[in-house]
Image (spheres, rainbow, N blue to C red):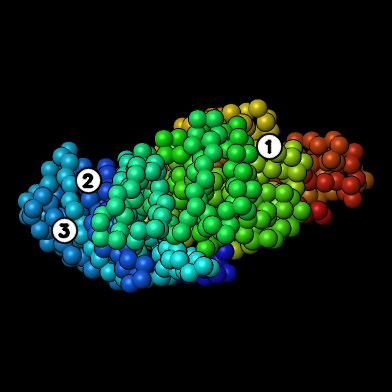
Amino acid sequence: MIALCVLFSWTCAAQAPTHADILRGEYGPYRANNDLLYYHLDIRVDPEKKFIGGKNTIRFKMLKDDTRIQLDLHEALKIDKILLGSTALQHQRDSGAVFVDFPETLRAGRVYTIDFYYSGNPVETGRFGGIAFRKDPSGHPWINTACEGIGASLWWPNKDQWRDEVENMRISVAIPNGLVDVSNGKFMGKTDLGDGYTRWDWRVHYPINNYDVSLNIGNYQHFADRFGDLPLDFYALPEDLEKAKKQFAQAKGMLEAYQHYFGEYPFPKDGYKLIEAPYSGMEHQSAVTYGNHFANGYLERDWNGVGISPRFDFIIIHESAHEWFGNSITAADQSDMWIHEAWATYLECLYVEYMWGREDGLKYTNGYKSKVRNALPIIAARGVNATPPQDMYFKGALFLNTLRSVVDDDRRWWALIRGYYQHFKYRNIMTEDVVEYFNRKTGMNLTPVFDQYLRHTALPTLELTFDDAKGTVSYRWKADEAAFAMPVRVGTKDHWQVIRPTTAWQTMETPVPKDQFEVATDLYYVNAAKN
Ligand SMILES: [Zn+2]
């Protein structure tokens, strides 16, 4: 996703969490006592009444003996019944949480399946609508979901958290004849239900985040292509079809670049889809939505102001990067969403480097400095449904570029980030897992570097004090992390020298006078202060 805090102020303030936030955010005992295996979301959508009804079949394995589990469903929606076989289950609602009680103890190690029936008019909320019942320009229904912030339980019942994912899923959506539903996964076919509705069936072959599960219902036209063995399926409104055929061709270059750096597209059995939507875009797994006006840049602007983003379609490149980072590798708590967004933003930079070379890649990366605020730490409070600030995108990408300079050997760097992806793909992880991996694989203690960039607001400052008479410079890091000891290049552009400052002063001789002495701030995102 590309979210801007100016529009999403509620996500950015470090406010005390509400009771509802704790219920949503905490991996509490009635979530931790089970492991999700499978969903079959089977619903009917009435565009005119803006009404959804149906059921989610939820299969889970108990991890300990218990009589209660926690699911989630927005208060605007009615619970019709929850069944275990033919037994109706009691439940208790508390804001968005639904505590389901079982008449007998569920046993650790055993698998259970319940059918959660619900119905109602879901609430439209947030910048993308969460779930939005709209009309396309020619008056056909156009219904799309994008609910990462508010949560998927806005429109369907599920275990609405990030840590636990189903292993696979079916999505069945009945809609009026003549409309098309594009959801996630592989299209399995459609069935005329004989009552004016047709059911569209999709099968997701991989673990999937709840918020990635999506509806795209509209008067879509379909066209297809392939990238090697990977099926590419594209959906656009008829009036946009020719523009889409031209613009969506960029998906192939994106796949080529990302596969070059990280390995195979993560969801080959599900294919890759791009679907026109009435909002800017979202990384829905194997079904990326697109609303970037069929033009390069972001919403027809030069996104970070250095003249490079007009060469490519920002939404195709950014949102598709999440297939690797966000959908395949997923943060286990929203607090650590930099694992999605810093990486997806960094992948844009790698795409630029792959297409146009290292110099343009660096220029594009450093273009993001104008968007950094350094006002809140990138990692937000854990377990309270807190969304991190937008620095997780731009400062996060600049941090990863800094890490490349710290490794200071591109062959090692390429192997390191490919290895990172391959090691953690299809898993839900936290920052500690990332840091442990990079420390182990580099043999360096990068923990203070990660912590300085992710857990504090201020950039590290390289303090430099010159004695031109003696021909020396003294240097140290000013940083919140006492053990911050990041190597950095200094001197002049033609003759960089790597120094290893700590937070204590060191002095060295230099032939470069103060006014010509530079710090490689394009390679390391740091401040420099000369005295
Ligand atoms: Zn994103």
Answer left or right for 356 relative to 99: right
Residue type indicated by callout 2: Arg
- As measured in the structure, the alpha-carbon distance from the residue carrying label 1 to the one carrying label 3 is 51 Å
Q: Is residue 412 above or below residue 174?
A: above
User: Along the line of sight, which residue is nearer the eye, 148 or 18?
Assistant: 148
Image quarter of residue 456:
bottom right
User: Along the line of sight, which residue is nearer the eye, 268 or 49?
Assistant: 49
- Determine the secondary structure under disc 2: strand
Residue type indicated by callout 1: Tyr
- Determine the secondary structure under disc 3: strand
Where residue 284 sits: x, y (%)?
45, 51
- As measured in the structure, the alpha-carbon distance from the residue carrying label 3 to the one carrying label 2 is 13 Å
Q: Mark 2 or mark 3, which is nearer the start of the sequence? A: 2
Answer left or right for 402 relative to 455: right
Give the residue at x 62% y 43%: 249
Q: Mark 3 or mark 1, which is nearer the start of the sequence? A: 3
Where residue 42 sits: x, y (%)?
27, 53
Dot 3: few (<14), some (14–19), or many (≥20) neighbours within 10 Å?
Answer: many
Mark 1, residue position: 354
Q: Which mark is residue 209?
A: none
- As measured in the structure, the alpha-carbon distance from the residue carrying label 1 to the one carrying label 2 is 43 Å
Q: Is residue 389 in view from this perspective?
A: no
Mark 2, residue position: 59
